[in-house]
Image: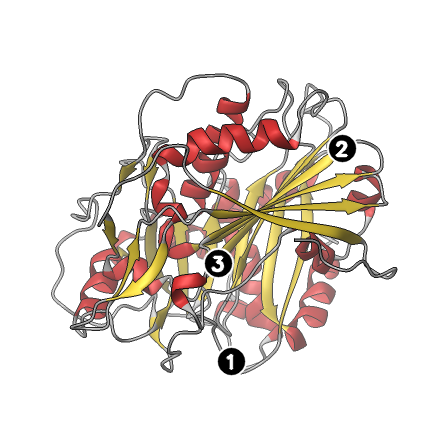
Amino acid sequence: MVSPQHDHDLVYNLRLSSVGPGCVTGSDVVHDLSGLDLTMKLHYLKAVYFFSSHAVEGITIMNMKEAMFYLLNDYYITCGRIKRSESSGRPYIKCNDCGIRFVEGVCDETVDEWLETDDDSKRNLLVYHRAIGPELSFSPLVYLQVTQFKCGGISIGLSWAHILGDAFSVSNFINNWGQLMAKVNVNSSPALAPRSLTNAKPEAPSEPLSAKQVNHVGDLWVLANNCKMETFSFNLTTQHLSNLQAKIGSVSAFDSICALLWRAIAKVREGFEPQIVTVCRKDPCHEDKNVLGNNQIIRSIKASFLVGESDLNKLATLIANDQDQVCDERNKIETAVEKDNGSTDYIMYGSNLTFVNLENAGVYELELNGEKPKLAYYSIQGVGDEGAVLILPLPHGSAAENEGEPRYLVNLTLPEGQVFKLKAELKRAALL
């Protein structure tokens, strides 16, 4: 199927096809969604990887599809479609081998020209995305778009329904695909994430702070925000981090960045500062790169003081160390959703201001012809009104001591009216 070309489109000649497992999964295979999975039903993850012409030399679309056939034998759940239980209406995935959607596109810019622009909205052109619904049984859960640039380089864009798994699952999925393209045997199949969340301490049932109930959406899985949301990103250099950590002390770069942005956002919200934030990190108990699921640690952190006027060290220490006010809420979220047997709609990202640590996601482990991406970019579709911040590493070579070298990519999704004020605040802090 070929879409019509428009001269004003930067990415055009979109061709859509389906890719499924090379082997039949079997009849009557289903994947039951946990309460935590269903909390993510209105969230979608997007990833874009940029590669030079040298990295893709000799790699064809057919090579990519062939490797995907093999990968989907293991990741057959991603090829399924959403169904509802006839008795309860609870969603589940019917593993019917309908496949993921494979999209090909063309761009008349070079990869370097594209990367030079500061327009984050342009990246959406490199990720074909459709929300699940309203016809649940016809909605793919994964879209993969390969865009050919005029320089011979490519981008690989992935749209991923968060009910399948978190950003660490996305990275593992695409990294395993890269290994198969390199003819590296992936020996073990992806295992479903265990439903007993062993890392979370037993707690008395209570409503989670890090997720909230939203109006019922029916069969069109799209979040209705109260305001228009805007996404923008910026780089933090080695010098930025040195200056920041000199003020804060011996906490991690991630905790320092969170403290800085939490305070800056509190200042621009003028009396409505976020007292509670959610922080998501990789669960060290789920190091298996073939595990598929929503396994990230989800913690709520509450400040008992005015955030906008606070000391950065105090905030960073709260994020990093104050276990009395930090709790893993996965069990609470699971309990809240299961209370109504999955019939109530929740969101997690943007229920509070949400920070996501992707430092250990392995986003630069995808290699083509032995080369890593020039840039890897992740974002979230369907963020609630409180906003979300993703913090990713950037590639750096032997010149790591270079003070001007970018080290982290910070991607923010916030209410449109707050973005201009936040940029001004970041400029005052010499970060933009």
| 103 left or right of 197 in image | right
| 392 left or right of 203 in image | right
The three-letter amino acid code for the residue at tag 2 is Gly
Figure disc tally: 3
The secondary element bearing badge 1 is classed as loop
Residue 238 or 317: which is nearer the viewer? 238
Q: Which residue is mark 1?
A: 272
Callouts 1 and 2 close, C-beta under 8 Å = no
The 10 Å Cα crowd at callout 1, few under 14, some 14 to 19, many 20 or more, is few
The secondary element bearing badge 3 is classed as strand
Tell me how the rendering is colored.
Answer: secondary structure
The label on residue 44 is 3
Task: Give the alpha-carbon distance from disc 3 to disc 2, as whole Å.
Answer: 26 Å
Question: In the image, residue 55 lies at what x, y percent?
Answer: 70, 23
The label on residue 153 is 2
The three-letter amino acid code for the residue at tag 3 is Tyr
Question: In the image, residue 330 lies at what x, y percent?
Answer: 26, 56
Report the mark closest to the observer, 1 or 3.
3
State the quadrant of the C terminus.
bottom right
Residue 326 seen in the figure: no
Question: In the image, residue 104 lies at what x, y percent?
Answer: 67, 44
Residue 324 or 36: which is nearer the viewer? 36
The secondary element bearing badge 2 is classed as loop
Which one is earlier in the sequence, the residue at label 1 or at label 2? Answer: 2
The structure residue drawn at horizontal position 33% and vertical position 64%, both measured from the top left corner, is: 39
Residue 256 seen in the figure: yes
